[in-house]
């Protein structure tokens, strides 16, 4: 399973090419697809959500659990699946961010990659700075509620 950690700021060239951090690329290369899946974040307006092909298949399966004729299914399929782009790596480990993705995130000459565990986000650096400060403030209040569940406890049903 992929584990995306840390923050990286990388240059974006005039063609929209950006290097994906090397530590991320290792988890984004599989027999099925060597690249990243990117879509506008449905919850963080200025961010792009990104993941590997396996995670995208899991998201698709989750969406498929809804009644295919319900608003929930249609809304999530549109917000996530329809707007997703497969971005393959070039020989130098770069991807080309589509123009609509650059515009959505307000990315011009730099992109911030922010690890989120099984996924990561891509932001304009200034927007990410604002988000990070707000999220860190919210996390202070949430930290006391956080419980770490060890795998052996979960398997034992505790």
Image (tube, rainbow, N blue to C red):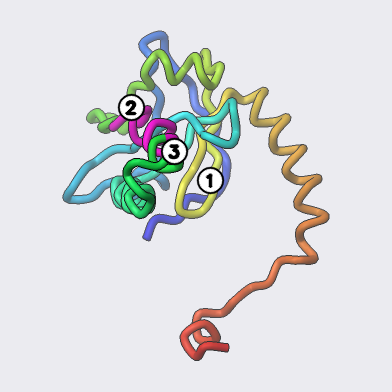
Give the class, few, some or many, for how many residues have Cα within 10 Å of label 1's Cα (few <14, many ≥20): some
Q: What residue appears at the point 32 percent right and 52 percent down from the top-left corner?
A: 61
Camera-side residue of 62 and 69:
69
- Sequence-earlier tag: 2 or 3: 3
In the displayed structure, does residue 120 sit left or right of residue 139?
left
Q: Where's residue 134, x and y in %?
A: 76, 38
Residue 132 figure quarter: top right
In the image, which residues are magenta?
A: 75-86
Give the class, few, some or many, for how many residues have Cα within 10 Å of label 2's Cα (few <14, many ≥20): many
Q: Is 122 located above or below residue 12 in the figure?
A: below
Label 2 residue SS: strand
Q: CA distance from mark 1 to mark 2?
A: 17 Å
The residue that mark 3 highlights is 71
Residue 28 seen in the current view: no
| Labels 1, 3: front one | 3
The residue that mark 2 highlights is 95
- Sequence-earlier tag: 1 or 2: 2
Q: Which quarter of the rendering shows the C terminus?
A: bottom right
Q: Where's residue 19, x and y in %?
A: 39, 29
Residue furthest out toward the front = 69
């Amino acid at each position: 399973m992929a584990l995306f950690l840390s923050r990286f700021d990388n240059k974006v060239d005039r063609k929209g090419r950006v290097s994906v951090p090397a530590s991320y690329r290792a988890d984004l290369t599989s027999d099925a697809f060597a690249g990243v899946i990117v879509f506008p974040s449905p919850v963080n307006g200025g961010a792009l959500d990104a993941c590997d092909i396996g995670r995208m298949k899991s998201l698709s399966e989750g969406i498929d659990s809804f009644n295919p004729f319900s608003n929930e299914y249609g809304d999530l399929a549109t917000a996530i699946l329809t707007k997703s782009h497969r971005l393959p790596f070039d020989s130098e480990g770069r991807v080309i961010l589509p123009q609509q993705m650059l515009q959505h995130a307000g990315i011009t000459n730099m992109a911030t990659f922010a690890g989120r565990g099984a996924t990561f986000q891509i932001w304009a650096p200034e927007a990410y700075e604002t988000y990070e400060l707000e999220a860190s403030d919210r996390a202070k209040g949430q930290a006391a509620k956080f419980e770490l569940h060890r795998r052996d406890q979960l398997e034992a049903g505790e």
